[in-house]
Image (tube, grey):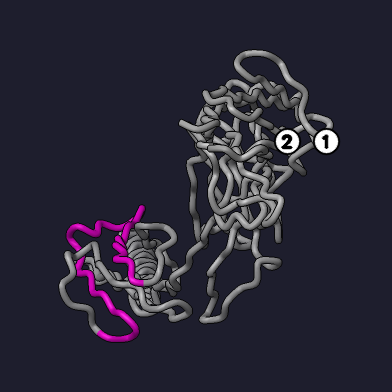
Amino acid sequence: MKKCYNLKNKMKISLEKLVKLALIITVLFTVSSFVNAQESNTGSLSSIYLNMSPDSPRAGDSVTLTVNSDTIDLNSSKITWYVDGSLAKNTSSKSLIIKMKSDGQTTTVRAVAETQDGIVKEVSQNISPSAIDLVIEPLSYTMPFYKGKPYFAPQGTVKIVAIPDVFVDGVRVSSKDLNFNWSKDDIVLGSSSGKGKDVLILYGQIPIRDVNIDVKIMDDSDNILAENSKLLTTDNPETLFFEDSPLYGVLYNKNLYNSYNLGTRENLNIVVKPFSFDFINDVTDASEYSWYVNGNTVAPSIKANEISLKQSSNVSGSASISLDLKNADRILQYNTNSLNIIFGQQ
């Protein structure tokens, strides 16, 4: 009788353990289902993201957006794209190609991924076209009234101005509120970079070679808003001959080259203008003018870059006028030019 009683007690205890175990399993299953439901319905635990190419598109550019994930299998998931709230067409599952709107207009792209297990994830991004133009301004001498720009001479100085066309939420952002990241040949120029630093002054160095300049516009989270680059090539400076007319002054409309027929005129005043030398004026402490007539050294006129020629009567022939110009502060900036003067009755 006692054995039977003990057996009943053991069976009762075992039954209670089974009930408790069933309750625990039920609770765990309920919690797991709740978590999955939360993840499926809200997508609050985002694990997908968008890659965009190009990183900083301009207005009218075609942009490829690709959805990626480190936690779910997108290859077996159903992916739906929306552009500005409307269902997108012509998608290739994980990728979508859109065309940028005009400057200042934002495009909203949303990708929704649903796995085979019913988990739903989504990611969205607002994209505004941005651009940045670079203006190259070599800081060297040009002739008066010259409408073009000089060369970037060896050992020269150049100013590069970044002109941004960046919009955030449809509003154009001023240069003073943007972060500019400058680099030369992939080396970041830290001292020239920073908020509002839209101008870069660059000095040519030795050895002479082409230089690649890149600028990125960054937001406060170091995201690239716009980017552009320029390859700077060097050209040798020149010296240009002009006639200084006693009636009209220096005739800048036409430079003298190769030969000049003086005819029977008594005088010819020649002015030389340095082009693309790193001079503030045509004559400076660093400008070294050396004049030659038929190979013989001659003195200039009142200014170092001027020479006056006078012919005798009843004489005809030709004379070679040549000039060497050197920049005493920039040994790689020099030029030699010559002009053949034909005079007398031919």
Left or right: where 168 falls relative to 311 = left
Residue drawn at the location 55% of the way across and 30% of the way down:
341
Q: How many marks?
A: 2
Looking at numbered disc 2 in the image, what kind of residue is underneath it?
Answer: Glu
Disc on res. 271: none
Q: Residue 12 versus residue 318: which sits nearer the camera?
A: 318
Q: Is residue 190 visible?
A: yes
Secondary structure beneath dot 2 equals strand
Find out whether the residues at labels 1 and 2 contact each other: C-beta distance under 8 Å: yes
Residue most toward the top? 296
Left or right: where 25 falls relative to 257 = left
Residue 194 drawn at (x, y percent): 70, 53
In magenta segment, residue 63: yes
Residue 247 drawn at (x, y percent): 69, 55
Looking at numbered disc 1 in the image, what kind of residue is underneath it?
Answer: Ile
Q: Residues within 10 Å of mark 1 (few under 14, many from 20)?
A: few
Q: Which residue is mark 2?
A: 306
Q: Is residue 246 above or below residue 278?
A: below
Residues in magenta, as a range: 60-86
Residue drawn at the location 28% of the way across and 71% of the way down:
98
Q: Residue 21 versus residue 169: which sits nearer the camera?
A: 169
Quadrant in which residue 57 is drawn:
bottom left
Secondary structure beneath dot 1 equals loop
In magenta segment, residue 279: no
Q: Is residue 27 visible?
A: no
Q: Which residue is mark 1?
A: 302
